[in-house]
Structure formats: structure tokens, C-alpha cells
Image (tube, rainbow, N blue to C red):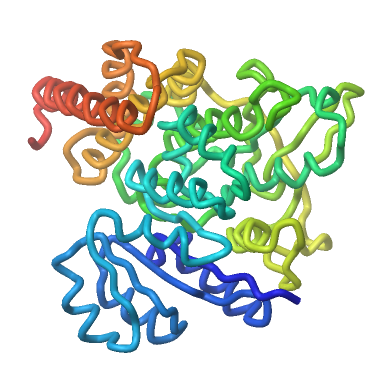
Amino acid sequence: MTVIRVALAGSTGSIGTQSLDVISAEADRFELAAIGATGRQPEVLIEQARRHRPKIVAVSDTSAAAEIAAALPECEVRAGADALASLATEADVVVNGVVGFAGLSVTLATLDAGRRLALANKESLIAAGPVVQLARRTPGAELVPVDSEHGAIHQCLRATDNRSRVERLLLTASGGPFRGRSAADLESVTVAEALAHPTWSMGPKITIDSSTLMNKGLEVIEAHELFGTPAGDAGYGIGFDEIDVVVHPQSIVHSMVEFTDASTIAQLSSPDMRLPIGYALAWPDRIATPFGRIDWSTLGRLDFEPPDLETFVCLSLAYQAGRAGGTAPAWLNAANEVAVEAFLAGRIAWGDIARVISATLDQHDGAPASDADAVVAADLEARRIAALQLQLVVAATGANA
């Protein structure tokens, strides 16, 4: 068996630590060549390097570099804005577990280097879809999604060789901690309540996104970018009208593909992110460790229901931005990051997240996502507008500035 060299960007986060679990469980298959993170938790990065012994450690924050280098004399330590992206040439597979728009450089560097990208950073694909699509055409470049939903669709699509027979993609959503509650009920929810996800253990940003269903909205756009290009190219000819969301509180069915004869293929497993991580690392093979095995004797039931779009407005906003195209998804993503950060800091209420995003999208300038510079500019402009909308919300509600 050929050993696969892995570089891990965002190693101290939820995806990063679970990726290390997979690599450790399959030590005969994977070699950890490099790890990297922002540097906000240098002690965690140091501990990871000592335990897993990569040759290269990268850190975005230059102020943490000296401490890390002193603690890891056996490692090459890279620091600075391009440090994480530089890992793209050091491995066969790069896991992009960086949170937020900051992961764009890792995505583009990996694909431009003609390597396999195990993508957990959905924001870079959402904000810069047209740019990423160009990079995917690089000889040798592969993109295998790590999101449980898109990993499930990727697996389900292996059931057909005829792209024209794919009718619909169905993304499942747990419904988050507030499933079944009205918008009025949610005006006074706390950060702690929003972070109490019923089935998944994730980082704070993505957990808040799950509570608003923005995470599912971002995944709709991601699914369109991954699988929706015209049939005969890289995708299946799937438009936004053929991508549906269904709430499934047990989080056992991770997504489904419906074919033209109405046959539906689903991927099922217990909720464990190590399964889609391992799938992306081993593609086109599978790992041998049974992460997410179902106990069928105790499963009991599987429930499904439509999402409540009146309460969870963010899902509709994502469809709106996706259909608008261009830099609209970048504006959506940027405004969401600004609003979620403000909510986590206690500056705005949970319901204000959607209000800030909606007001920001209302001012979208219609610019195309022509290249990486245009996407970065769009992200900055959207953050500026979102910050202004945030100030208006704070002023109107008398919340803490």
C-alpha cells in the first residue's frame, strides 16, 4: 500500500484534531508531513507536533513563531500570511480545515499545485466559486469535500456513470438546537443555547451557523459549486432548483441523490466527522477504521420534515445569493462572519444575524467574481457594509457596542 503524505491546515480546530485521529488510526496508510494553524493556540500546535512528528509546522501569526520554533527545534517552522498556503506542495493531500474566508489561499494553492484538496473550508468555495473552478482544472488537482453532507453526495454519485440521470440533490439538516421554535421564541436566546448542538460537536462559528441554518444555506451554494456545473464538464447539470434541504434531526442520513427514475441513494452513518475526513484522505479507496458505525438494533426511527423558512431566514438568503451569483455569495459569507462574530461577543441578538446579512445583501454592487483579487475586494467591501449595518442594529436595540 502506497503511503499518502498529508498536510493539515487548521490543525488545532475541530476538523484538524479529528483529522489527526484518522491519521493515527491508519498509521500504515497516512504520513503527516506538515501541520499549520493561525497561531492563536501555540501550545496546542506544539503539542500536536511533538505527538505526531511532522517535518514542517506553519503558523500565520508571526508573533507566535519564535515560541513554536524554540519548542520544536527538529521542525521547519514557517510563519506569515502565506505560511499555511505554502503547505500545498508538501503533501499528496491537503486538508483545509481553516475557518472562514481565511482558508481561500490554502484552497487555491493546493489546486494550483495539482494536489488533492480535502476541503472542509466551505467558505472559500462559496465566496470564490468561479475562481476555484478554474483552479480545479489544473492537471492532477482533485477536490473531495469533507463536509458530511457533500461527502455523502460524493459517495451517492458513485452509483451512476450517467450524469444526465441525476435529478435532484437532497441535503439533510439536523435542524440545530432551535428546531421547532418560532422566530419570536428565539429573540432572547443566549450564546450558550445556540452553541448546544443536539448531534454534532463542532467549532463555535459553524455551530452558530447550524442554529440559524446558514450552515445549510452555505452548503447549498457549495453543492452547486461542487456538482452543479453543466453536464459534460465536471458536474451534473444541477441548478439551485434541484438542490433541496430536508430537516432530519437524527443526523444519520447525511444526504441523498435522487435519479430520474425516482430511485434515491442515501449515505447513512452515525454522526462522526472522522468518516468523511477519512473518505477524503483515502479517495478513491476507503479507510479500514469504522468511524460512525450504526447500531441498527437501537436506531429506532428516522424522521424528515421541511425547513421552517420563516424562522430560519438565513437559508432563504443563501439561495438568494447563490442564484444572484458573481460576488453575491462572497458578500453573504462575509456578512455572516461579521454578524456571527458579533453575536458570539454578545453585541447583537440571535435574530439580528439574519437582519445584518439581509441588509448587507441589499447593497450588493453586482460585481463579478472575475479573479482572486476581485473576490478579496468583494469580501472587504461586504465586511465594511456589514459593520455599518451592525452599528445600526446595535443603535436601534441599545445593545452593547
Q: Is residue 376 visible?
A: yes
Quadrant where the N terminus sits is: bottom right
| Rendered position, 281 above or below 240 | below
Quadrant where the C terminus sits is: top left
| Rendered position, 212 above or below 276 | above
* Picture coordinates of residue 161, whole percent (x, y): 87, 36
Can you tell which quarter of the image residue 84 is in? bottom left
**Front in this rendered view, residue 18 or 96:** 96
Residue at image position (48%, 42%) is 122
| Rendered position, 274 above or below 343 | below
Residue at image position (26%, 33%) is 339
| Rendered position, 195 above or below 317 | below
Q: Is residue 194 visible?
A: no
**Front in this rendered view, residue 90 or 104:** 90
Can you tell which quarter of the image residue 290 is in? bottom right
Q: Is residue 138 left or right of residue 299?
A: left
**Front in this rendered view, residue 270 or 72:** 72
* Picture coordinates of residue 252, whole percent (x, y): 70, 50
Residue at image position (40%, 23%) is 369
Report the residue that reaches farthest toward the right: 261
Residue at image position (36%, 51%) is 204
Q: Is residue 161 left or right of residue 131?
A: right
Q: Is residue 274 left or right of residue 217?
A: right
* Picture coordinates of residue 236, whole percent (x, y): 73, 27
* Picture coordinates of residue 44, whole percent (x, y): 32, 75
